[in-house]
Image (cartoon, rainbow, N blue to C red):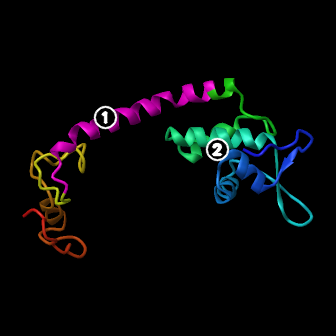
Amino acid sequence: MPKIPEKIHELTVGQLSARSGAAVSALHFYESKGLISSRRTAGNQRRYTRDTLRRVAFIRAAQRVGIPLVTIREALAELPEERTPTREDWARLSEAWRSELDERIKQLNRLRDHLTDCIGCGCLSLDTCILSNPDDAFGERQSGSRLMVERGRGRPQGRPRQRQSGDCS
């Protein structure tokens, strides 16, 4: 990882990319979404303050655990400008995200546990399909694509799907 002398207080986009491991395009994207900011030089080049390194690390860590960018932006907005997120900031924010992550873990475990129940063809012809219809309100009446016919008063909605080999009848 390239070292940046302490006396340099601003980084180019290339330096920030090299130090953070984030692609230049990702840094531009983060900036367009309001997650990081830069100033422009007279030559219209971006310059980032050194604390942006910690912000990028914070963003990437939050993304790795599945936190949406909009939630990350809201969290970073709570911090004073020009201040790097500290260990205490991360602990406070991660605690707030814990219940959301726990719910996602439960959903993924349910998905994994029910994969064997799925026939995988997309026809929705199972009486109950935990993958394609997890809260099956209509499953007790009937299953599958027949509901489209019922909603359309006897005719399918939209263009009929072309049957593929391997489709269930």
Element class at badge 1:
helix
Residue tagged by mark 1? 109
Q: Is residue 124 above or below residue 19?
A: below
Disc number for residue 73: 2
- Residue 129 is situated, as x and y percent measured from the top left of the image, at 18, 47
Q: Is residue 65 above or below residue 46?
A: above
Q: Image check: 123 left or right of 111?
A: left
Task: Say whether residue 67 is visible.
Answer: no
* Type of secondary structure dominating the magenta stretch: helix
Of helix, strand and loop, which one carries label 2?
helix
Q: Amino acid at mark 2?
A: Arg
User: In the rendered view, would you say 26 is above or below 69?
Assistant: below
Displayed quadrant of residue 155: bottom left
Location of the C terminus by quadrant is bottom left
The boundaries of the magenta stretch are: 91-120
Q: What residue do we see at 12% from left, 61% from top? A: 146
Establish if 80 lies above or below 44.
above
> Is 76 positioned to the left or the right of 45 in the image?
left
